[in-house]
Image (cartoon, rainbow, N blue to C red):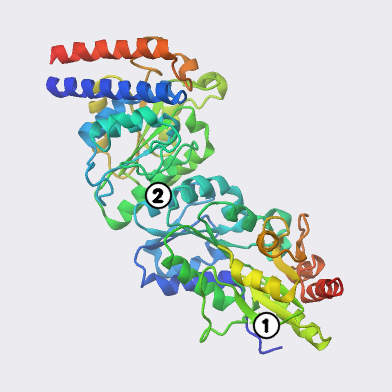
């Protein structure tokens, strides 16, 4: 990847991480861990891949995105704000009464293509959107992001069967494999492993990638776009809480908001990272 | 009675989909491996490229329907009521109801008249489940004419609609030439002053038979067909409560949460008069011929007549 683009993406990702922390802190609740683990992916999708139109969010030919792991809405909202769908200031009223930004994605928010949050359901909706695209020979692409804990839901595998059966090659599902869910390690709670083999067995083209290396993300999506006749699953190896040192790989940060001290510490780390990136560019 | 035409409303559903396909090019049909039974097989035969079988996976089917609707299609998602409303409830609630997507649910084999398949397939809870979802329209047609009109009206409505159909052939009581169907508007089929029977689905015909029997006994029974349980025609029901002073509801559904509950809620709030509910009395069904089961569970003109007599006596 071009060095300039990589730096640009890293800066966007840093802004998005700051937006996530702002949102969860001001909400005094929410899910920072799994939001931070998909921040780089969201940056890559919304700033290099997806044809979206902040001034015309419902444009019929746009690419679609469904956050199947809807509890990480802060990552989606901060990304949409960074992309220009609404002001980043909205993050400060996340989850507040009367606010636009609901605790989980809501279809009425500009740029949000599907309400989600009850796990296992977003991927089915994404299948429906992809099927509509195939049915009408539209050219849009549909992306959906699932949690690795989420794929314990049986509906995910109904959808996986469906997508392969109808050859939905306009659908890419990314599984955020950070290895942790609320009750602990996914391998200890009720293991969904081997994830890669499962999607392959269901008829998907499967690609593994490093979730925090834009060059590797780019490699994975370039491979994905060449696949025809079957849906693509990208298993991204990620770090829960990525970018905030004390949140990384800590299951306790799945669904906990930082207190004032932790908020300051997290923001200081992200500001330092941002300054470093800006100095380099 | 030999000239009475009988038809199952599931047949009407399949025929209506085929009839409307040409006019509505965004109409697509989904099924979960029950096309032969839900009668969407007729549509599949006529419009194979607009029919998508989802296999035995109703949860995903409802989510796929949501995605299709979000992308501008008008999907009819079809299965038995037990699975459409029961198994997939939470998907219907969160993926269709909450985003208020334009999905039509065609739920066949509702109620006790499923017959021999028994309790696991006799869904008497679907109306209760569906009407708790904000913005969901719930329609339970009485016959072939009304079922076809309901499907046509459901397409014209922008938003989620639950249409309930039956397996058993039932008499056609509405004249297709003159019948006017409007979502949310009840139909007064018989004027009467002593008591009102508010019925839905196949119980509408039973209510008419009961009214004839009772007329011969000198009891004047008003009969109202409530095909749309949500939004409920409260105005018509409250007017009947005021004018007749007593209400009997009749439905092929649990007495908990369905038409009887909806009517009682409306009457309680606006004009409290006694409401007697006829339906499945908080019990599971069992195997048997549909017609015998309906009689056994009190879903008959005879039972309606009995309850009406009690209601009049108690006035």
Give the numbered dot on residue B190. Answer: 1
Give the numbered dot on residue A195. Answer: none
Horizontal and vertical percent for residue A5?
15, 24
Which quadrant of the figure has residue B1? bottom right
Q: Nearer the viewer, residue B296 or B36?
A: B296
Which quadrant of the figure has residue A262? top left
Tell which subunit mark 2 falls on.
B
Secondary structure under tag 1 reads strand
> Which numbered disc, 1 or 2, marks the residue that appears first in the sequence?
2
Q: Quadrant of the C terminus of chain A?
A: top left
Q: Residue at x 39, y 70 (%)?
A: B21
Q: Are marks 1 and 2 in contact (CB under 8 Å)?
A: no
Secondary structure under tag 2 reads helix
Left or right, B194 with respect to A124, comes to right
Horizontal and vertical percent for residue B11?
56, 72
Q: Which numbered disc, 1 or 2, marks the residue closer to the eye?
A: 1
Q: Residue at x 17, y 19 (%)?
A: A7
Dot 2 corresponds to which residue?
Answer: B67
Q: Quadrant of the N terminus of chain A?
A: top left
Tell which subunit mark 1 falls on.
B
| Label 1, residues with CA under 10 Å away: few <14, some 14-19, many ≥20 | some
């Amino acid at each position: 990847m071009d060095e300039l683009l990589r730096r640009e993406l890293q800066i966007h990702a840093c802004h998005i991480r700051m937006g996530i922390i702002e949102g969860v802190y001001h909400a005094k609740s929410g899910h920072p861990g799994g939001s931070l683990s998909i921040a780089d992916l969201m940056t890559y999708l919304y700033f290099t891949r997806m044809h979206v139109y902040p001034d015309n969010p419902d444009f019929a030919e746009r690419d679609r995105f469904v956050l199947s792991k809807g509890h990480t809405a802060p990552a989606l909202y901060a990304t949409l704000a960074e992309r220009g769908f609404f002001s980043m200031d909205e993050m400060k009223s996340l989850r507040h009464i009367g606010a636009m930004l609901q605790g989980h994605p809501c279809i009425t928010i500009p740029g949000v293509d599907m309400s989600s949050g009850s796990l296992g359901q977003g991927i089915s909706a994404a299948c429906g959107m992809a099927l509509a695209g195939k049915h009408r020979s539209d050219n849009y692409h549909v992306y959906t992001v699932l949690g690795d804990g989420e794929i314990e839901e049986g509906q995910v595998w109904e959808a996986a069967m469906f997508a392969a059966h109808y050859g939905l090659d306009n659908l890419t599902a990314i599984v955020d494999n950070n290895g942790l869910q609320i009750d602990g390690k996914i391998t200890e709670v009720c293991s969904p492993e081997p994830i890669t083999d499962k999607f392959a067995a269901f008829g998907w083209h499967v690609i593994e990638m490093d979730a925090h290396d834009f060059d590797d993300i780019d490699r994975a999506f370039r491979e994905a776009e060449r696949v025809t006749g079957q849906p693509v699953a990208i298993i991204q190896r990620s770090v829960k809480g990525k970018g905030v040192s004390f949140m990384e790989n800590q299951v306790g940060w799945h669904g906990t908001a930082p207190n004032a001290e932790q908020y300051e510490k997290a923001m200081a780390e992200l500001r330092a990272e941002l300054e470093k990136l800006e100095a380099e560019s | 009675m030999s000239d009475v035409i009988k038809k199952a409303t599931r047949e009407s559903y399949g025929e209506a989909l085929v009839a409307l396909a040409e006019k509505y090019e965004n109409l697509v049909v989904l099924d979960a491996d029950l096309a032969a039974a839900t009668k969407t097989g007729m549509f599949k035969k006529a419009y194979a490229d607009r029919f998508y079988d989802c296999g035995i996976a109703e949860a995903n089917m409802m989510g796929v329907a949501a995605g299709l609707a979000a992308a501008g299609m008008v999907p009819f998602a079809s299965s038995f009521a037990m699975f459409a409303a029961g198994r997939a409830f939470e998907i219907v609630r969160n993926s269709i109801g909450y985003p208020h997507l334009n999905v039509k649910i065609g739920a066949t084999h509702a109620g006790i008249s499923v017959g021999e398949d028994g309790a696991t397939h006799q869904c008497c809870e679907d109306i209760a489940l569906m009407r708790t979802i904000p913005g969901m329209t719930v329609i339970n047609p009485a016959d072939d004419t009304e079922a076809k009109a309901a499907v046509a009206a459901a397409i014209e409505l922008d938003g989620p609609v639950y249409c309930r159909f039956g397996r058993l052939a039932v008499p056609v009581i509405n004249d297709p030439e003159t019948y006017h169907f409007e979502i949310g508007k009840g139909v007064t089929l018989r004027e009467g002053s002593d008591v009102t029977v508010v019925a839905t689905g196949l119980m509408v015909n039973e209510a008419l038979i009961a009214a004839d029997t009772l007329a011969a006994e000198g009891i004047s029974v008003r009969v109202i067909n409530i095909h749309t349980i949500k939004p409920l025609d409260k105005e018509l029901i409250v007017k009947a409560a005021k004018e007749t002073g007593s209400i009997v509801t009749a439905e092929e559904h649990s007495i908990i949460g369905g038409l009887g509950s909806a009517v009682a809620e409306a009457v309680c709030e606006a004009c409290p008069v006694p409401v007697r509910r006829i339906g499945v009395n908080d019990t599971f069904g069992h195997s048997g011929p549909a017609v015998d089961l309906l009689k056994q569970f009190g879903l008959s003109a005879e039972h309606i007549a009995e309850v009406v007599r009690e209601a009049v006596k108690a006035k």
